[in-house]
């Protein structure tokens, strides 16, 4: 049963809700404790098929009410087991195929009986082997055939492991999990190559069976063992032993990183084990394993290579990491008979293969085989320089001495749960293939409700007279000042004027403030409807308006508590100071925490009579001398130069432009620069 959330806390809360659901429905759950009786089995189906799946994840594998409760209690206590939140990216998955000595009686029985995808592959392989040998592969794997040691015979061990690994690959594919990279340890590389499309299922089975027959027919079987020491230490001991013994002696069969496999005549293997045990070095002899990757397999190599004379070998369709070289198989390289000859004889470079997996950015390693053998090697041998070790999981597990087959029947479900927690996308319909389920009502998603209320700032704007000037103050010396507050979002049009992503007060604002000063006492001004007012109409003139520094609102910042502070809530205190009897206007501002006031603009304001004096331009004549321009292109050019104008500042409906007037003096950059005396002429500056 999958559990997921947008946050870790949500996963824990969801587990609490599910636990409450179990308490509420306990009387209706199956009395025999079976997960196959509804509605307990429908819980997992509905949680898988009826919910979205988010980055923070946990999964509970259960077989009855007690194990379900225990799993939910673990999630509540420990939180989600997500090893690598997806964050929108699919993890890179590698399949690692186990080799010789991983077999056990009953391996794969549970997936054969419950998973159609696995059963189909095993039945295909069993039909071919029955045709070739007259014996059922299924009976050999599950211990039905006469003699419990039949599976340990190389002629059966190798095709059985190959068939089970291909079945597990198909089973993972049926739930949407396919590898981007494959690697196999010795015998396991045959199934890895089949998954990569190098040859067909039947051709790979024929090769595994032929390889097993040839090994079984060797004149001397020999033995294999592992020594838990470095390659240098074991290699030096093997060389010293071979120098003093008769015959070829021992071979370094596999470099697994944390341990080294040795192979050769049984007496030599025993002597080497005694040597390391005397030095308190841990060793282990491989059960029922001939001397692979040693000189003892030389008699089988010619016929092994000859098998591929009639097999079409294709280029891999996905990345294959060779256990022979420890490196990626290069494009164009042939994994043919010559390759498999060397692969069966030379040392397995599994430690180097692990480093290659790390270099390929693998996030999840799924072991494909009868038992979890390679997983610990991968975890312990992963380069320490890598930022994060991969999630490593085993498709199947062999029962320990204290366990029965029933104790590990859920091992594949456990592997699927771990894959889900690692962020691997799953095709849940495939997971429940062949089963009848129904949707049931489950607790809703536990939204992590947090209050994000935006408190309205204290504003003094508009409390007196004019909405731009704010509160009016008078000093004993006759000076008048107005005080207000401006925000990036108040006035609302302020946020529509941005320069390089910063909210910037437009220059026209200063002129509007200055020209409003004479009318702050309530007299009619240029913007009033004088026809409806009995007060005398007045107008004002602003001269020599100079902008000294921009008024820029700060971007989003983080306060001492780590919370983001919205610039829209960071106002600036603005004061407009009017000189006593001089008409001099200065506009200042200061932000919170600033010690000094900043002068933004200053100019001269005077009151004038109503009406516009002087000559007026003939607009139609002027327009005929200019060319129409694209309004949208004008605004795009503004944006390209770093000026972002919102809808409040996109009021132009038409634009005409032309070259500078010929009677204007030229500035060094070629643009007309009218002097004070020329301002009443028709000279117009139109810089491009």
Image: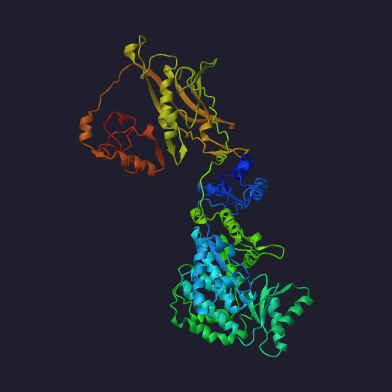
Q: Nearer the viewer, residue 26 or 367?
A: 26
Residue 426: % across, % down: 51, 55
Q: Nearer the viewer, residue 254 or 634?
A: 254
Q: Residue at x 44, y 14 (%)?
A: 521
* Image-based side of 141 in relation to 629, left or right: right
Q: Residue furthest bottom?
A: 246
Q: Nearer the viewer, residue 534 or 206?
A: 206
* Image-based side of 220 in relation to 305, left or right: right
Q: Residue at x 58, y 70 (%)?
A: 353
Q: Nearer the viewer, residue 308 or 475?
A: 308
Residue 26: % across, % down: 63, 42
Q: Is residue 476 above or below residue 3?
A: above
Residue 96: % across, % down: 57, 67
- In the picture, the quarter occupied by the C terminus is top left
Q: Is residue 646 above or below residue 336?
A: above
Specify whether residue 328 is in view.
Answer: no
Residue 99: % across, % down: 60, 72
């Amino acid at each position: 049963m999958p559990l997921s959330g947008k946050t870790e806390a949500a996963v824990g809360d969801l587990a609490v809700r599910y636990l409450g659901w179990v308490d509420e429905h306990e009387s209706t759950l199956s009395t025999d404790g079976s997960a196959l009786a509804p509605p307990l089995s429908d819980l997992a189906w509905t949680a898988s098929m009826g919910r979205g799946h988010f980055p923070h994840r946990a999964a509970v594998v259960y077989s009855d009410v007690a194990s379900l409760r225990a799993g939910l209690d673990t999630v509540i206590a420990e939180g989600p087991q997500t090893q690598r939140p997806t964050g929108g990216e699919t993890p890179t998955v590698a399949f690692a195929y186990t080799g010789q000595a991983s077999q056990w009686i009953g391996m794969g029985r549970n997936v054969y009986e419950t998973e159609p995808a696995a059963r189909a592959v095993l039945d295909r392989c069993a039909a071919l082997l029955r045709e070739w040998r007259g014996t059922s592969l299924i009976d050999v794997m599950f211990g039905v055939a006469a003699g419990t040691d039949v599976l340990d015979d190389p002629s059966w061990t190798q095709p059985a492991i190959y068939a089970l690994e291909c079945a597990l690959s198909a089973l993972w594919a049926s739930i949407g999990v396919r590898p981007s990279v494959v690697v196999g340890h010795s015998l396991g590389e045959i199934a890895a190559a089949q998954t990569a499309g190098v040859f067909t299922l039947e051709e790979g089975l024929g090769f595994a069976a032929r390889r097993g027959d040839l090994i079984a027919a060797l004149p001397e079987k020999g033995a294999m063992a592992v020594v838990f020491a470095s390659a240098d230490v074991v290699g030096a001991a093997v060389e010293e032993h071979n120098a003093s013994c008769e015959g070829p002696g021992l071979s370094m069969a596999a470099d697994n990183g944390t341990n080294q496999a040795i192979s050769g005549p049984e007496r030599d293997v025993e002597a080497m084990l005694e040597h390391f045990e005397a030095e308190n070095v841990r060793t282990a002899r491989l059960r029922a394993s001939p001397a692979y990757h040693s000189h003892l397999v030389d008699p089988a190599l010619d016929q092994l290579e000859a098998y591929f004379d009639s097999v079409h070998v294709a280029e891999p369709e996905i990345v294959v990491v060779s256990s022979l070289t420890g490196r990626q198989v290069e494009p164009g390289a042939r994994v043919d008979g010559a390759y498999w000859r060397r692969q069966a004889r030379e040392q397995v470079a599994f430690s180097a293969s692990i480093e290659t997996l790390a270099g390929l950015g693998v996030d999840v390693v799924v072991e494909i085989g009868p038992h979890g053998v390679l997983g610990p090697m991968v975890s312990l041998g992963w380069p320490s320089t890598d930022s994060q070790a991969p999630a490593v999981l085993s498709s199947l597990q062999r029962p320990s001495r204290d366990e029965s087959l029933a104790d590990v029947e859920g091992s594949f479900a456990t592997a699927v749960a771990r894959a889900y927690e690692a962020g691997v996308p799953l095709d849940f319909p495939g997971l429940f293939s062949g089963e009848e389920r129904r949707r049931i009502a489950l607790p809703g998603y536990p939204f992590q409700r947090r209050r994000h209320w935006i408190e309205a700032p204290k504003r003094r704007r508009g409390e007196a007279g004019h909405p731009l000037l704010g509160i009016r103050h008078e000093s004993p010396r006759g000076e008048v000042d107005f005080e207000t507050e401006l925000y990036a979002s108040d006035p609302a049009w302020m946020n529509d004027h941005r320069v390089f992503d910063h909210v910037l007060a437009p220059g026209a604002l200063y002129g509007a403030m200055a020209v409003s000063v004479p009318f702050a006492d309530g007299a009619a001004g240029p913007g009033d409807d004088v026809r409806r007012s009995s007060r005398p109409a007045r107008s004002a003139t602003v001269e020599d308006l100079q902008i000294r520094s921009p008024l820029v609102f700060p971007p989003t910042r983080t306060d001492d508590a780590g919370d983001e502070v919205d610039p829209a809530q960071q106002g600036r205190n603005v004061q407009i100071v009017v000189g006593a009897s001089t008409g001099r206007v200065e506009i200042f501002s200061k932000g919170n925490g600033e010690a000094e006031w900043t002068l933004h603009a200053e100019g001269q304001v005077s009151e004038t009579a109503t009406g516009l004096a002087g000559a007026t331009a003939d607009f139609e004549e002027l327009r005929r001398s200019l060319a129409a321009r694209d309004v949208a292109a004008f605004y795009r050019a503004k944006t390209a130069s770093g000026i972002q104008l919102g809808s409040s500042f996109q009021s132009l409906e038409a634009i005409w432009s032309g070259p500078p007037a010929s009677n204007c003096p030229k500035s060094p950059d070629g643009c007309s620069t009218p002097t004070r005396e020329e301002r009443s002429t028709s000279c117009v500056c139109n810089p491009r």
